[in-house]
Image: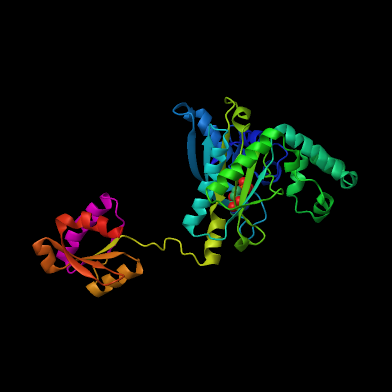
Amino acid sequence: MFEDAELFIRSSGESSEVVTKQMYDFRDKGDRHIALKPEGTAPAIRAYLEHSLGQQAQVTRLWYFTPIFRFERPQKGRYRQSHQAGIELIGSSHPNADAEVIEFTVDFYRTLGLTDAQVRLNSIGRTETRARFGEAILAHMAGWLADQDEDGKARALKNPMRLLDSKDPKIQEAIAGLAPITSFLDDESKARFEKLQELLTEAGVEFILDPAIVRGLDYYTETVYEVQSPSLGAQSALSGGGRYDNLIAELGGPATPAVGFAAGLERALIVMDALGVQAGASGIDAFLVGANSESQLHLRKIARALRAAGFSVSFDLDERDVKRQLKAADRMAARFALIFGHEEVASGHVAFKQLSSGEQIDVPEAHLISTLRKRLVE
Ligand code: AMP
């Protein structure tokens, strides 16, 4: 939930918006400078280093699910506490790793049913490329810069690329016509970026090249991307990610390349809502129906065994009549109703009913698990 504030100052950057404006930080009773996590990558890497997670294999794949906290003006899609799910692929600098993470991202949204998610891709090259691009930004915006106060000038000089993220119309106007960062890439970065695009195309991943995606954190190198959805309006980003080859060394570890992404879950829910996708609409495997209190006792035993075998099953806790139990099975979108009538229980059988078709067969209890397993994949 919280980390040493220094972790974010060192990773996101002292002058980053996350650190200067959004991070909730405070001194605890031991006078330690603490911050509520404003993002998940630096904490994941802190854990990776602290617990030597990279020792087992050359490549380490991590995932997390975490609340994040940012001090900002709350509005739809922008909250002071929200939740992120993210992955980090650590230990490979090959574009195959970037492609794997981006493919994973696309699969994630496809599984959720977010059909309008768009990948916007860019490359920001190495540290030296960004330094050259920064000088070009300042030269291009010299007129605007001259009008700024000392503070504004100092901020712009410290990290000119942040100006590209600005929503200020004056800044946007001054930026117009600036050559994209991709025209500053060296040959190696260009080749990497081209290879990545080839791999994505080959994998059937659609993407839009967008030189405006630069990401606000200092640790990104080479590949950066965002997934956006037109259903989100102003807060259009569903997730963001990219390569961060310098972060692990920056945090005191051995130089190790890595790439990852983080998805905002509240924003995914907003889009699911807008598209009419129902969360959890897939229902359960089976609903167990009992004819009387004796069979109820028996069916709870069977429910336990089915749950232990990995099936999602439910039953009526209030032991209502069979008609109501079947209604409850429908409401829970169960695939099958397993009916334990008086006679069935006595003979060790179950009435096995497919709810979509109404088709019903008689199954010996001993074959229940294998029948359910077989019928669920048909
Ligand atoms: P970022 O690292 O800022 O690009 O954040 C990654 C993703 O987390 C964004 O694309 C959003 O989906 C989500 N996110 C970030 N900040 C917030 C917030 N304050 N409220 C809701 N979602 C957020």
For the residue pair 347 and 356, the one nearer the viewer reads as: 356
Q: In this rendering, does residue 366 appear at all?
A: yes
Q: Which residue is drawn at 62% across and 47% down?
A: 225
Q: In this rendering, does residue 12 appear at all?
A: no
Q: Which residue is drawn at 51% across and 55% down?
A: 109
Whether 26 is drawn above or below 213: the answer is above
Q: Along the horizontal axis of the image, is 150 left or right of 223?
A: right
Whether 286 is drawn above or below 357: the answer is above
Q: Along the horizontal axis of the image, is 191 left or right of 112?
A: right
- Residue 31: % across, % down: 62, 32
The answer to whether residue 258 is magenta is no
For the residue pair 278 and 300, the one nearer the viewer reads as: 278
- Residue 236: % across, % down: 64, 57
**Of all residues shown, which one is farthest toward the left?**
347
The answer to whether residue 311 is magenta is yes
Image quadrant in which you'd find residue 284: bottom left
Q: Residue at x 25, y 56 (%)?
A: 374
Give the magenta-colored segment's residue range. 290-317
- Residue 295: % across, % down: 16, 64
Image quadrant in which you'd find residue 199: top right
Q: How many marks?
A: 0
- Give the colour scheme shown: rainbow
Task: Quarter of the image for the C terminus: give it.
Answer: bottom left
Image quadrant in which you'd find residue 3: top right
- Residue 87: % across, % down: 52, 42
